[in-house]
Amino acid sequence: MSSSSPTTVLNSAIEFDARGIRIEGGPRVVLCASLFYFRLPREQWRARLEQVRDSGYTCVDVYLPWNFHETAPGRWSFEGRRDVAAFLDLAQETGLYVIARPGPYICSEWDGGALPAWLGLDPELRVRQNEPRFLAGVTAWFDQVLPLLAERQYPAGGTVIMVQLENELDFFDCEDRTGYVTALRDQAIRHGITVPLIACSGQGDIEGATGDVPGVVPACNFYPDDDSPDIEPEVRRYAELLSARGLPLLITETNRRHRTLRRLLASGASLIAPYLQSSGWNFGYTPSTGNWGTPANFMSHGYDFGGYVSSTGAERPEYTQAQVLARVIDTLGPRLALATSTVPGVRVSADFPTSSSPSALDLDEGGQLIAVPHLGGADTTDTAAGTAPGTAVVNGVPVAVAADSCPLMLVDVPLQTWGYDGTLTLASADLVAASDGVLTFSSEVPVTVVLDGARVEIPAPTAGAPERVTAGGLTLVAVMPSDAVRLRAAPIRQSAAPTWQSAAPIRQSAAPPTTVRAARRRPDGAPEQPAGSHELPPTLESIGVYRGRGTYRTTADLTDVDELLLVGAADIVDLSIDGRARPTIAGFGAAQRIDVREATGPVAVEAVVEIWGHANFDDARLPALRLGALRGLGTPWTVRDVTDVSALWSVRGHWAGLPTPVRVLGGWSSTRVGLPVTYTRDIRSDTASALHLRGVVEPLRVSVDDGEPRTVTAEDPWVLLPAGTHQVAVTLPHHPSGGGLGAELLGLEPVTGWSCSVQDDELLTRFAAEAGRAQDIRLPLALEPGEEAWLDVDLPTSDDGFVVRLDGEQIRVTGWAARDAGDDDEGDGECVGRVWVGDDDSDGDGDGDGGRPAFSGGDSNILWIPSGWSGLTLLVRGAAGPGNPELRTLRLESPDG
């Protein structure tokens, strides 16, 4: 167990070097599953941890969200479902290592990426920068959380083996990466963190993620197309780069499919941590808004990307694949853990789609492990690939390879360790057990074994019926993957056949769905908390709402006004003008034009604005997608006049001479396609105004009065201007095929005199938990746009809980259920999710005319009632859009259904 490269000692128990990870001297390949305490009921923590352990994975990675524990400025909570120390202790009891990821930024499609919403209230504070105001907040967070981690480091007090600082910083425009990461590192050291500190890159920029700070180990996140033939050479490149630094390749996030994970293993990964193998649920108002739509989305409350365990705890087929891969890793042990990545030493070809450059591992003690992926699958349209087994030729020997698989083939491996004085010249299937005289392989197709040059064929096994062949004094056994996972972990000795553990009891089929039409409607709605009077609409955060909603009211004079311009509204705006509901707006802060020709004179304006979640990723295309962006009504303006300003733009750039030519915006003709050209003109308005650039396709740059240029995108092609005369310069790449640009100037006056009231998430949750008078009703329930109904629903008894699927049209539903009090948890209610029932916004502009915005994550049409939780309270609100708001039925389904 030697290593030719220097060892990086970061903790006497945890060592890294170019050949891998050592834990107390023992070399390890670590399979790690994401498991998030904050996305699970506390009473399910132990079962989910045991589920990960039983999958064969040996580690969990866990984010610790800052804003989950600091619920308001200076108000900290580490109790109940927030008791992360108890979760870490359970991981230790379960026998799992832990990679802790305290941020301060975590992404994770979580509200604000875990950065508290109130940070955005300080205009001088810049998140994720080496900036004193932000770092002061980080210090307060680290002072709370790092001592908990320090106490639970391996091996002294727990099983925390690594601590990750930040998250994918190479995606973010950080001005001083070295200074910022150094500040985080120093705080970790100050709090006694001695296990390795790591920092992961999201797009392969190691320096961008770590700042090349000494003492911070680079890790990599890979999210390739599972069917790409080019995964291996990319991953090998990073393995080689890190090996040159005396470090292993740590993959802290990747896809969940084990066919892909096998390719990463063969390409040199010592840590493989597929993101979200164990799915969860976003309780409360904790999902984010993100940039996975066209261009934006709401994250669903179900947080599930198809990992081996569903949000509700059901095991999927990949769970078996996890167990098989874990058995291969255990069987090969240090040989595999000390292996180095390379390419096959023998020729490999295939008649099926496969890797463009297969990877191999030079095993310690000799031989190679070669990953041979069959990239054909059930959805393959190429009949040559199909779903039937293919044939690979390895060193001249044809072997069968199942579709949608990646066998880890062994070549020229000495067998003395396993009681045979010879060499395994080739094995075409996964070696899942080895003992004195017995080699057991897992496969769905025939297995080819070559021993000291003698070829042996093992027929394809069937479930429960292994195939055995004796050759050269060895017993060779082939079993189905479903049987391989039941092999006893202990070595098999003096037996010609493997033995199995008893099969897990067969779970009875899920109960049939139940349709619920009875409910009780409360006569009153939740109280509103007054939040003062304001000249202009304040952000919700500035009036104390970090999660929840607020109501804005005023009277506006719409005499001779045809439209309003609403700028910066987010996330969900239900707007009523003169008692008429307007289409629900979910435009992510983009300016929205609102037709008000049917209203005249002084009219009542009311807007209910709900925070879905703050952005978890920094995207400049829309205002609400910026990291740290605030929520609220934004600024409503009355539009007093509209003037076309498409003409009379002076041209600078290319060969334009003096005096400067004057053209329409975008009208310069040139052969210099793709090179920037600038159009300039003076624009005057007696009031504040908005310049609307029509026809924007590619992003362009706009500066006003020679100020700092800003980017204008097709998603929000507006520039606000103060009253007066301004020189506006528009710079764009010359694009003759891009269509014409136009410009119009809207003269604006702000709508003022607002009164506000708020309902934060805690107020709404308290009201949902209150028992009171209610009237029995039967569904369907029809509502007007903007009308609300509070419903209490009785649920039948269930040991497994329920998935509640809502059937209706143009309604938004928030659900709460009561947690049963336990020894370690409060028995109060909790929001179990929000659902927007209706057609998707087909035109993608977020103004509500086409339906709800895009959703990402898990199933966005369900609520989950965990086992042991009782009752269901629903806040049902009619949304303005196509169709009439109506809640028709509730459908109760088994979580495993």
Image (cartoon, rainbow, N blue to C red):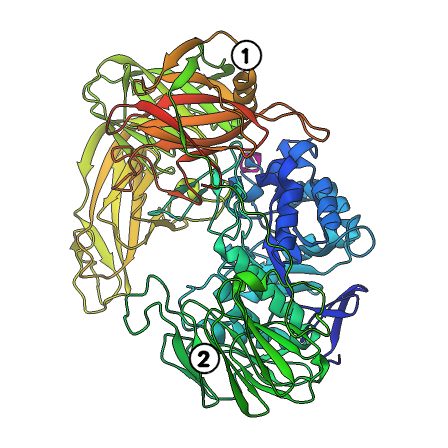
- Which of the two labelled residues, at mark 1 and mark 2, occupies the earlier sequence position? 2
Above or below, 171 against 8 in this view is above
From this viewpoint, is residue 4 visible? no
Magenta stretch contains residue 29: no
Residue at disc 2, secondary structure = loop
Circle 1 Cα neighbour tier, 10 Å, few/some/many (<14 / 14–19 / ≥20): few
Which span is picked out in magenta?
Answer: 118-122
Residue at horizontal 65 percent and vertical 58 percent from the top: 501
Left or right: 652, with 494 as reference point:
left
Question: Looking at the rendered structure, which numbered label has been put on residue 7?
Answer: none
Does any portion of residue 363 appear in the rendered image?
yes
Residue 355 in percent (x, y) is at 43, 76
> How far is disc 1 from disc 2 in space, using C-alphas?
65 Å
> Would you call the spot at circle 2 few (<14 residues within 10 Å), some (14-19), or many (20 or more)?
some
In this view of the protein, which residue sits in the foreground, 877 or 461?
461
Give yes or no for contact between labels 1 and 2 (Cβ–Cβ under 8 Å): no
Rendered view: 896 above or below 555: below
Q: In the figure, is residue 28 to the left or right of 426?
A: right
**Quick check: 366 left or right of 324?**
right
The residue drawn where x is 51% and y is 89% is: 346
Quarter of the image that includes the C terminus? top left
Which amino acid, by three-letter code, is at mark 2? Answer: Ser
Tell me the mark number nearer the camera, choosing from 1 and 2: 1
In the picture of the structure, the residue carrying the numbered disc 2 is 357
Q: Position of residue 170 (x, y in %)?
A: 53, 59
- Image location (x, y in percent) of residue 536: 42, 23
Query: Which image quadrant: the N terminus?
Result: bottom right
Residues 216 and 773: in front is 773
Residue hosting label 1:
771
The image shows residue 352 at horizontal and vertical percentages of 36, 76
The kind of secondary structure the magenta stretch mainly shows is helix
Q: How many marks?
A: 2
